[in-house]
Image: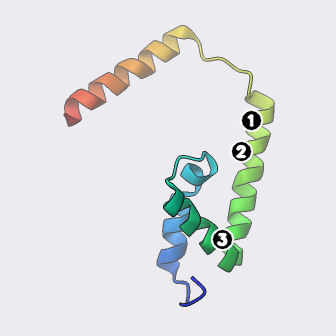
Amino acid sequence: MSERELTNDDCWHTLQRMYEFLDHELDDASGDDIREHLTACEPCLERFDVELAVKTLVSRCCGGDVAPEHLKAKVMMQITVARQQLG
């Protein structure tokens, strides 16, 4: 990103993938792109820092909570229905 000027579109794409990045759900190349963008873009880095702090706080405060079995079953049913509709 240092070779070209950052655009609002670059920031938008980075912020759209922020939670995937925080949850380590991106491939290496995508993660590298976001790291590079955060290094070059202070506003996005500040937003990242806030999101990371919130995620850490929630994890610390609620990390041991377990969903009730009826909620798990309901979510799994909705996933099954959604897959059938897509498939």
- Give the mark nearest the N terminus, 2 or 3: 3
The quadrant where residue 59 appears? top right
The tag earlier along the polypeptide, 3 or 1, is 3
Which disc number belongs to residue 26?
none
Q: Quadrant of residue 23?
A: top right
Q: Which residue is mark 3?
A: 38
SS for tag 1? helix
Tag 3's secondary structure?
helix
Q: Residue at x 57, y 65 (%)?
A: 32
Q: Is residue 87 left or right of residue 16?
A: left
**Cα distance between the residues tagged 2 and 1:** 6 Å
Question: Which mark lies nearer to you, 2 or 3?
Answer: 3
- Counting from the top left corner in percent of width and height, residue 36 is at 62, 73
How many numbered discs, if any?
Answer: 3
Tell me the amino acid under the disc marked 1: Ser
Q: Residue at x 54, y 9 (%)?
A: 69
- Label 2: which residue? 55
Q: Are marks 3 and 1 in contact (CB under 8 Å)?
A: no
In this view, the residue in front, 52 or 78, is: 52
Badge 3 crowding class, 10 Å Cα cut-off, few under 14, some 14 to 19, many 20 or more, is many
In the rendered image, the quadrant that contains the N terminus is: bottom right
Question: What's the distance in space between the residues labelled 3 and 1, CA to CA?
Answer: 23 Å
The answer to whether mark 2 and mark 1 are in CB contact below 8 A is yes
Look at the image and tell me in which quarter the C terminus lies: top left
